Image: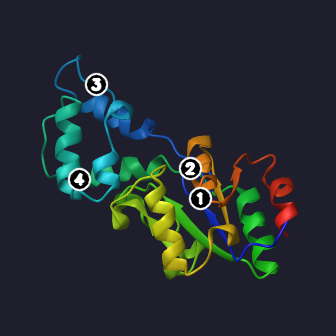
Amino acid sequence: MPQPEFAIFDIGQVIYPYTLAPLDALMKSLAVDNDGRSAPEYDYNPYMRGELTAEDFARELCLFCHVKYDKKLLPLIDEALHRGRGEKYPQTLEAMRLLREKGIKIGILSNAMPALNDGYIEMAEPEYVFVSYNMGLLKPDVKIYQTMAKKLKTSYEKILFIDDKEINIRAAQSLGINGIIFKPETILQEIEPYL
């Protein structure tokens, strides 16, 4: 198997575990009635595509969850989103180290929420970071992988993509990108053929 030029990692559930439970708890604690929907049911796609400002997102989320909106909620929502982020997987950090050791450049490709843009900054060079809110695209749309490869100035075959969702891996593989479905317990064995 040829060695890739780039190893591109997803963020949530690949670099670190992530849950919306703290945000859901906040929204439920503030709901004006018991008929409010839960935060995990909300459609985050427009926010992740960069179509909403943080305030617009907070306003829509509050409306969805039956919470009376107030600008003072912005920092509470931001804090709850951040509390959903766990510690980085040591297996991911080790995989990145091994890949770098072989001269493979590390990148990021994620359907990320803009509020969480501080959770991966140090993981890759800025020119190798691709997030949905800057691209206006979401995985598994093949256009996001095409745009990424074009900006990396490389062929699909020279990219190794690591994501926790099979649908995203399949979309990347449909273009010829190498893919690994991330599991902490197997990632180090999965990358061995690419080293």
- Which residue bears the numbered disc 4? 74
Label 1 or label 3, whichever comes before in sequence order? 3
Pointers 3 and 2 in contact (C-beta within 8 Å): no
Label 3 or label 4, whichever comes before in sequence order? 3
Vertically, is 44 above or below 179? Answer: above
Label 1 or label 4, whichever comes before in sequence order? 4
Q: Nearer the viewer, mark 2 or mark 1?
A: 1
Residue type at the position of mark 4 = Leu
Label 4 or label 2, whichever comes before in sequence order? 4
- Which residue bears the numbered disc 2? 171
Vertically, is 130 above or below 29? Answer: below
Q: Residue at x 35, y 67 (%)?
A: 134
Pointers 1 and 3 in contact (C-beta within 8 Å): no
Residue type at the position of mark 2 = Ala
Colouring method of the image = rainbow
Q: Secondary structure at mark 1?
A: loop
Q: Secondary structure at mark 2?
A: helix
Q: Residues within 10 Å of mark 3 (few under 14, many from 20)?
A: some
